Amino acid sequence: MITSKETLDALRDCPHYGIAELLQIMQVLRSENGCPWDREQSHMSIRQDLLEECYEAVEAIDMNSVPMLREELGDVLLQVVFHCQIENEQGNFSFDDICDEVCRKLVVRHPHVFGEVSVENSDEVLRNWDSIKQQTKHQETASETLEGVCRALPALMYAQKLGKRAARAGMDWSSAEGAFDYIRRETDELEAAMQQGSQQQIEEELGDLLFSCVNTARHLHVDAETALRSASMKFLRRFRQTEQLVTADGKDMSALPIEELDRYWDQAKRQISGGE
């Protein structure tokens, strides 16, 4: 692809860019006379970039920052266009093909809007969505629906989705108490594994304990990923306050015994507002 100076000037001086210009810019960057770095990239080489941009968009949502969200959604869109251009060069699909497929999916999965199906609430919408999704993906067994869960998801999210789909097939506890009881059982099994000293068994039992915690969270209508992230941020706030208290007393955290650090930790907890 040889791009004329007039085209490059037009793209550089465009008063307001749209999706057409974004697609064209990516095509130029990947062209023979474009950017050496962009030309060298593959799906695998920019795979992590897509993940990071999605997480940054989520962070913008968590921070309730409209300007940040606008920017980060643009970065996510850039990654979509980048991957699309790689496939477009191979003649496999174009950006229009992506739009066509997702639009058809939306129409098919909303028969209560684009068809004659009647629904009374959001729960019915979700049941219809799952049923249509299972049909269109030709998932005939419950196991196939579980195997259809994306394995690249963060582990907690993946586990929660597995438990949710297993529950639809009847493989579930009748209450949160039943799920919680498994936490106790798995804790005992982990303790036994620790006493035996087998690293492989310890890892297995710890995984079972985490999975039980995720199932309990699901029964309590808590998103496990969100809960752990909130706990991590709480830990960060308390750690920062603890360090400030230790430093104010002229001490070095790394040199203190855990018993003294615990006392500072408790003090930090009392000082942080909100009753954490």
Image (cartoon, rainbow, N blue to C red):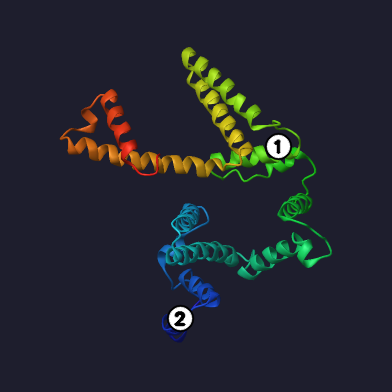
The residue closer to the viewer here, 23 or 118, is 118
What's the residue type where badge 1 is placed? Ala
Q: The C terminus lies in which quarter of the figure?
A: top left
Mark 2, secondary structure of its residue: helix
Write down the quadrant of residue 108 in the picture: bottom right
The residue where tag 2 is placed is 11
Cα–Cα gap, marks 2 and 1: 51 Å
Mark 2 is surrounded, within 10 Å at the Cα level, by few (under 14), some (14 to 19) or many (20 or more) other residues, namely: some
Q: Is residue 239 left or right of residue 80?
A: left
Residue extending furthest toward the left: 250
What's the residue type where badge 2 is placed? Leu
Q: Which of pointers 2 and 1 indicates the residue nearer the eye?
A: 1
The percent coordinates of residue 251 (x first, y second) are 17, 33
Vertical relation: 140 (above or below) 91: above
The percent coordinates of residue 207 (x first, y second) are 54, 29
Write down the quadrant of residue 223 in the picture: top right
The residue closer to the viewer here, 273 or 212, is 273
Q: Is residue 16 left or right of residue 258?
A: right
The residue closer to the viewer here, 246 or 147, is 246
The residue where tag 1 is placed is 166
Q: Residue at x 51, y 25 (%)?
A: 203
